[in-house]
Image (tube, rainbow, N blue to C red):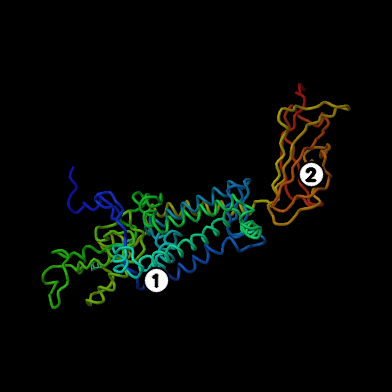
Amino acid sequence: METPENEIFRDSIGTVTKEGKRAWVFPKKPSGTFYNYRKWVSYGLLAFFIFSPFVKINGNQFLMFNVLERRFNIFGFPFWPQDFHLFVISMLIGVVFITLFTVAFGRIFCGWICPQTIFMEMVFRRIEYWIEGDRGKQMRLAKQPWNTEKIKKKGLKFFIFALISFLIANVFLAYLIGSDKLFEYIADGPLSHISNLVSLLIFTAVFYFVFAWFREQVCIIACPYGRLQGVLLDNKSIVVAYDHKRGEGDNGRKKFRKNEDRKALGHGDCIDCFQCVNVCPTGIDIRNGTQLECVNCTACIDECDHIMESINLPKGLIRYASEDNIEKKAPFKLTARLKGYIAVLSILTGLLIGMLFLRNDVEATVLRLPGQLYEHKDNNIISNVFTYKLVNKTTKDISNVSLKLLSHKGTLKLVATKDNFLVPKQGIAKGTLFIEINNAALSGDRNKIKIGVYEGDKLIETTSANFLGPRSYK
Ligand code: SF4
Ligand code: SF4
């Protein structure tokens, strides 16, 4: 079926030519109210992204995602592999929260919060404007032959981009391995930790590639969240939108002519100046309607507002609005879908808070040694052998730790460890232990036993295990 003329823009993306080559986007430097707000939000977020792995709360790194050692800190709260369920719930809350926001406000996360946009538009792009100038100058520089001016500008840009990519790679590594380790490696010298140096150079190359070359393609092609817009958005979602009713009027858009009565001629307020297209970092024309490529960066809102001001028309031809708002002047309303997401989000958040309160600083696991049954000893004593593992999730050593059998009368003996031992901070203590119980106190071949973990006289954790005994034929 042939695509209708007004839908032809959907057959291609603005960053690829008809021949399938990359169409480089030279966006005009944005300016205006929204851009100023975004700048301040970006400064705050940049400080957050850069300093989070170096700030500590109670000795815990504020944010850490140590995948290799499976240790995660979120807002200074340490998560161990044993807390995986909490981590999963936190991630689910993140997903539902972003989904809720997307259904209500479209891709607002991309334009205002996403690190890709923040670094691309507020760091790399601004350096580019500083070195190469605005859109027109950049286009001329790209076309001109490699003369001294071009070599100097491109060389300086390459050097600064590579340096910033290297710094970002260091921060990224601090998220992954922890800032303490990063400082330790730096102090030891790069050649003492070759694998670390190689990772650092790979990350640097990836960041350079993304911000110097791949750019908006991340949002258009690679980002899975961008792909989801098609299913999350509906007519009620508030997105960066062109008011086509006002812009097109009855007789469509038309170039501006001084002293012409556009209203009488039936033309809309859009003067077809293309400034909203020129400023767009993803190279699209927002007048075609909501598109997957739009990252809601608001640059076109600012640009169109400048134009409207200059021709004495009200601002807001491009603005934050839903399709229903433009078509039917319908105000924003909480739909059943949004209410559903809010309910799920509240339940998950309540669950997480409850679990965080119930979470212990020490986690104990006692398991029967695989392949071992029980031993029948003198005086009708039944003995089982177990392995134990104690995880100290705090940043302080826990000393004078002992284990006691709580559920039955019997004895608990540690193998090759003192009765009062130490569990190191953010570390593990493990070993083997025997539990002996008189057969008369058992109620069959499988008995649930309860073991207490004490710090001195204080019970800090309890755990249970299965104790095997002879079958009972009573
Ligand atoms: S900037 Fe505004 S007036 Fe100019 S083309 Fe875009 S929508 Fe029309
Ligand atoms: S259409 Fe407007 S809001 Fe969307 S990416 Fe382009 S400039 Fe940004």
When the figure is inspected, residue 400 is found, relative to residue 367, above or below; the finding is below
Q: Which label sits in the foreground, 2 or 1?
A: 1
Tell me the kind of residue under disc 1: Trp
Report the residue that reaches farthest toward the top.
Answer: 473
Element on which disc 2 rests? strand
Considering depth in this image, is 94 or 441 the residue closer to the camera?
94
Q: Residues within 10 Å of mark 2 (few under 14, many from 20)?
A: many
Point out the quarter of the image occupied by ligand 1.
bottom left
Name of the residue lying farthest toward the front: 148
Dividing the picture into quarters, in which one does residue 105 lie?
A: bottom left
Q: Amino acid at mark 2?
A: Leu
Q: Quadrant of residue 29?
A: bottom left
Farthest residue, direction right: 379
113 over 224 or under it: above or below: below
Q: Quadrant of the C terminus?
A: top right
SS under mark 1: helix
Q: In the drawing, what numbered circle is on residue 130?
A: 1
Q: Position of residue 326 (x, y in %)?
A: 26, 62
Side of 68 relative to 40 (left or right): right
Q: CA distance from mark 2 to mark 1?
A: 66 Å
Instruction: Residue under label 2, please give it.
Output: 403
